[in-house]
C-alpha cells in the first residue's frame, strides 16, 4: 500500500473523533463547564472575602490546595519521566499510550501551580517572587523548576505533534478552512522527508533525555521544600526519592485510568489492547512495592526513634486521622499489590480498579503529610481555639479543587478534538519499519 493512501485512510478513521461531537460529549462538556462556573464563583468569594472562607488559619496555613498542587505537579513530573523513557528506549507499544502521557504531563504542570496561587493571601504581591527572589529559598528554586519543566514539556509535546499536524494538513480536504489553516501553521512546513524525519527524531530524543533529568531534579526540589524544615513529619532525608516514587505511582495510575476511558469511549480496542494494560499493571505493581517500602520506612523510623514531637504526630495520625491513615497506607497500597500480583487478576477492569484505589490512596497520603503535621506544630501556638488548631476544608476549597479536575478533563477533550489521541505518524512509522507500506518518494 502506498504511504499517502495509508495516511488518508488513517485520517478518515480518526476524523469522527476530531470533528464530530456526540450528544454524550456535549452533555459532558456542559457539565464540566458548569463545575468550572461554580469554581469561578467560589474564587470570587475567596478573593473578595479573603481566606476566612476557607479552613486555613494561622496554624494550618496549607490545606487541600497545596495537596492538589503536589498531586498535579507530581503527576506532571511522572508523566514527563514516563514519556521520556518511552521515547528514549523506543518502547514497542509506546505509540498507543505516548500521547495520553504527553497531554497529561503538560496539562498537569499548567493546572497544578494555580493551586499555589489560591493559597496566597496577597496576590497583588505575587510579582515580588520574581523581582526579589531569594536564592537560598527552596520556593524560589521550585518556581524555577516548574517554569523550566513547563517550557520543556510543552516543547516536547509540540515536537511530537508536528508530524500529525503535517498529515492532517495534507489529508483533510473536507475539513473547515479554519482547521486546515491551523494545521498548516502548526505543522511548521514539515513535509515528512527522510532528512526532516531524522532531524525531528534526533531533536525529540535529546528532549526526552532532558525531560527525564528535569523530572527528577524538579520533583526533588519540591520535596526539599518540606524536608529542609525542622518540622516533625517533614524533616526527612528520604523525602526526595519518596516523592519521586509517589509521583510515578500516581502517574502510572492516572495513565491507566485515562487509557481505560479513552479505549471504552472512542472504541480504540485495536490500538489500546490488553497487553498495554498488563504492561502498565506490572509497572504499577513494582512501583507500589517501592512506595509501600518507603512509606513503611518513613513511619517506622519515626515510631522507633521515640522522639517527643514524632510521637505526638503519630498519635495525631492514629487517633484523629485513623481511617484516613488506614486507607492511604494500607488499602491504597496493599489492594493494588494484591490485585496486580496474581496473573489471573490482571484483567483490564481489575487493573483499572487497582489504579483508581492507588490514586485515591496517594491523595490521602499527601493529605496526611500536610495537614496532621501542621496540626502538630514544632513550637505550640498560643491560641488554642479548635478552629485555629484543626483544619476543616470548606465548600469553597472543594469547589475550586473539582474545578481543577474539571478543567483538566475539559482541556484534555479539547486537545483530542485537535489531534488524534493515537499518533498517526507513529502508526505510519511502525508500518514503514515492517514494510507494510511503500516509502514516500520525493522528486
Image (cartoon, rainbow, N blue to C red):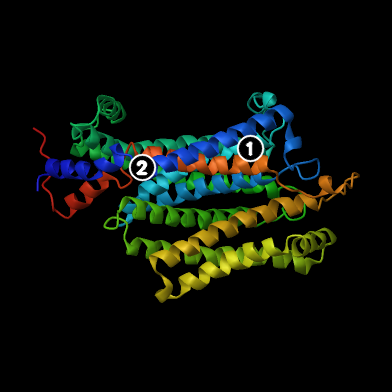
- The number of numbered badges drawn on the structure is 2
Q: Is residue 1 left or right of residue 284?
A: left
Furthest residue toward right:
382
CB contact under 8 Å: marks 2 and 1? no
Task: Residue 431: give x, y in percent of width and height.
Answer: 18, 52
Q: Is residue 167 left or right of residue 207?
A: left
Work out whether residue 89 can be spotted.
no
Numbered circle sitting on residue 365: none
Residue highlighted by disc 1: 116
Q: Residue at x 22, y 52 (%)?
A: 430
Task: Name the residue nearer the viewer: 54 or 376.
Answer: 54
Q: Residue at x 73, y 31 (%)?
A: 50
Task: Residue 317: give x, y in percent of width and height.
Answer: 75, 61
Callout 1: SS: helix
Task: Name the residue nearer the viewer: 232 or 104.
Answer: 104
Question: In this rendering, is residue 414 above or below 272?
Answer: above
Quadrant placement of the C terminus: top left
Q: CA distance from mark 2 to mark 1?
A: 36 Å
Work out whether residue 429 can be spotted.
yes
Task: Name the residue nearer the viewer: 267 or 324.
Answer: 267
Question: In this rendering, is residue 293 above or below 82?
Answer: below
Location of residue 440 by image quarter: top left
Q: Around disc 2, counting alpha carbons within 10 Å, would you say few (fewer than 14), some (14 to 19), or many (20 or more)?
A: few
Q: Is residue 318 left or right of residue 169?
A: right
Task: Residue 270: give x, y in percent of width and height.
Answer: 26, 57
Residue highlighted by disc 2: 23
Question: In this rendering, is residue 219 above or below 324?
Answer: above
Of badges 2 and 1, nearer the viewer stands 2
Location of residue 126 by image quarter: top right
Q: Around disc 1, counting alpha carbons within 10 Å, would you say few (fewer than 14), some (14 to 19), or many (20 or more)?
A: some
Amino acid at each position: 500500500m502506498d504511504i499517502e493512501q495509508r495516511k488518508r485512510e488513517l485520517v478518515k478513521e480518526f476524523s469522527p473523533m476530531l470533528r464530530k461531537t456526540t450528544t454524550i460529549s456535549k452533555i459532558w462538556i456542559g457539565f464540566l463547564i458548569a463545575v468550572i462556573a461554580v469554581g469561578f464563583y467560589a474564587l470570587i468569594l475567596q478573593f473578595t472575602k479573603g481566606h476566612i472562607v476557607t479552613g486555613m488559619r494561622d496554624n494550618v496555613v496549607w490545606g487541600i490546595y497545596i495537596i492538589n498542587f503536589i498531586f498535579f505537579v507530581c503527576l506532571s513530573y511522572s508523566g514527563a519521566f514516563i514519556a521520556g523513557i518511552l521515547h528514549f528506549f523506543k518502547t514497542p507499544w509506546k505509540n498507543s499510550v505516548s500521547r495520553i502521557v504527553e497531554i497529561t504531563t503538560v496539562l498537569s504542570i499548567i493546572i497544578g501551580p494555580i493551586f499555589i496561587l489560591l493559597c496566597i493571601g496577597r496576590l497583588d504581591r505575587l510579582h515580588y517572587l520574581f523581582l526579589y527572589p531569594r536564592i537560598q529559598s527552596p520556593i524560589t528554586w521550585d518556581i524555577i523548576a516548574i517554569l523550566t519543566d513547563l517550557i520543556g514539556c510543552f516543547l516536547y509535546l509540540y515536537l511530537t505533534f508536528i508530524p500529525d499536524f503535517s498529515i492532517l494538513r495534507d489529508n483533510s480536504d473536507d475539513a473547515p478552512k479554519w482547521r486546515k489553516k491551523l494545521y498548516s501553521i502548526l505543522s511548521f512546513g514539515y513535509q515528512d522527508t527522510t532528512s526532516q524525519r531524522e532531524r525531528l527524531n534526533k531533536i525529540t530524543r535529546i528532549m526526552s533525555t532532558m525531560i527525564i533529568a528535569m523530572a527528577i531534579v524538579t520533583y526533588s526540589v519540591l520535596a526539599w521544600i518540606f524536608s529542609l524544615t525542622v518540622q516533625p513529619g517533614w524533616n526527612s532525608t528520604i523525602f526526595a526519592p519518596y516523592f519521586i516514587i509517589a509521583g510515578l505511582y500516581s502517574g502510572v495510575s492516572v495513565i491507566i485510568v485515562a487509557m481505560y476511558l479513552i479505549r471504552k469511549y472512542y472504541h480504540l480496542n485495536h490500538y489500546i489492547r490488553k497487553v498495554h494494560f498488563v504492561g502498565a499493571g506490572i509497572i504499577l505493581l513494582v512501583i507500589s512495592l517501592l512506595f509501600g517500602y518507603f512509606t513503611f520506612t518513613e513511619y517506622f523510623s519515626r515510631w522507633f526513634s521515640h522522639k517527643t514531637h514524632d510521637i505526638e504526630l503519630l498519635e495525631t495520625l492514629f487517633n484523629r486521622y485513623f481511617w484516613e491513615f488506614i486507607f492511604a497506607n494500607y488499602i491504597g497500597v496493599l489492594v493494588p499489590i494484591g490485585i496486580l500480583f496474581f496473573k489471573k487478576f490482571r484483567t483490564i477492569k481489575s487493573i483499572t480498579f487497582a489504579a483508581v484505589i492507588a490514586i485515591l490512596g496517594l491523595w490521602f497520603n499527601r493529605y496526611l503529610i500536610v495537614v496532621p503535621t501542621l496540626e502538630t506544630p514544632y513550637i505550640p501556638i498560643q491560641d488554642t481555639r479548635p478552629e485555629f488548631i484543626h483544619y476543616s476544608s470548606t465548600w469553597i476549597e472543594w469547589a475550586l479543587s473539582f474545578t481543577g479536575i474539571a478543567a483538566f478533563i475539559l482541556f484534555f477533550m479539547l486537545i483530542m478534538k485537535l489531534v488524534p489521541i493515537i499518533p498517526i505518524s507513529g502508526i505510519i512509522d511502525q508500518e514503514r519499519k515492517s514494510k507494510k507500506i511503500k516509502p514516500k518518494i520525493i522528486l
